[in-house]
Amino acid sequence: MSFKSIEKMLNFYGQWNEIESLLYECNRLRLVMTITDHERNYISFDQTVQVQENLLAFGQKLRQVFQNVQEKRAEGGERARIFGKVKEKLDDETRSKHELR
């Protein structure tokens, strides 16, 4: 993408120097990875790096979701175990009352 095209798209941001500073800051913060060719006045976006980073971020989010699901299942299993014990005690009490009658 040419410098002129980017400058037209981001004209609300300011002059080219400000836009270039913005792109530099985005690179530094790893928000957008760009490769600047000052000789040809051209900027390309490093899609390979961005795809890898997006996959890593997705993998981390997927891992977190999996852990949350595992925790909920464990909580559900604990609840079922407690409910089973309470039900068993209630059944025992009901049986003992029926036997007394």
Image (spheres, rainbow, N blue to C red):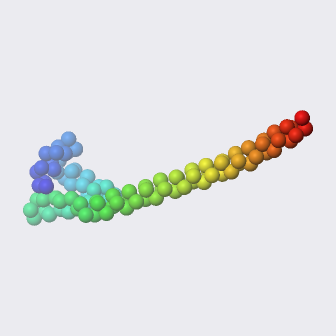
Q: Quadrant of the N terminus?
A: bottom left
Residue visible at 21% across and 59% down in the picture? 45
Residue visible at 68% across and 51% down in the picture? 81
**Residue 28 showing in the rendered view:** no
In the current view of this chain or complex, which residue is farthest to the left? 40
Query: Where does residue 10 sit, x and y in percent of width and height?
Result: 19, 45
In the current view of this chain or complex, which residue is farthest to the right? 100
Residue visible at 28% across and 56% down in the picture? 32
Q: Quadrant of the C terminus?
A: top right
Q: Quadrant of residue 8?
A: top left
Q: Nearer the viewer, residue 86 or 72?
A: 86
Query: Where does residue 7 sit, x and y in percent of width and height?
Result: 15, 48
Q: Quadrant of residue 44?
A: bottom left
Q: Exactly how many numbered labels are in the figure?
A: 0
Query: Where does residue 25 sit, x and y in percent of width and height?
Result: 29, 56
**Residue 85 showing in the rendered view:** yes
Left or right side of 30 for 93: right
Q: Nearer the viewer, residue 39 or 61?
A: 61
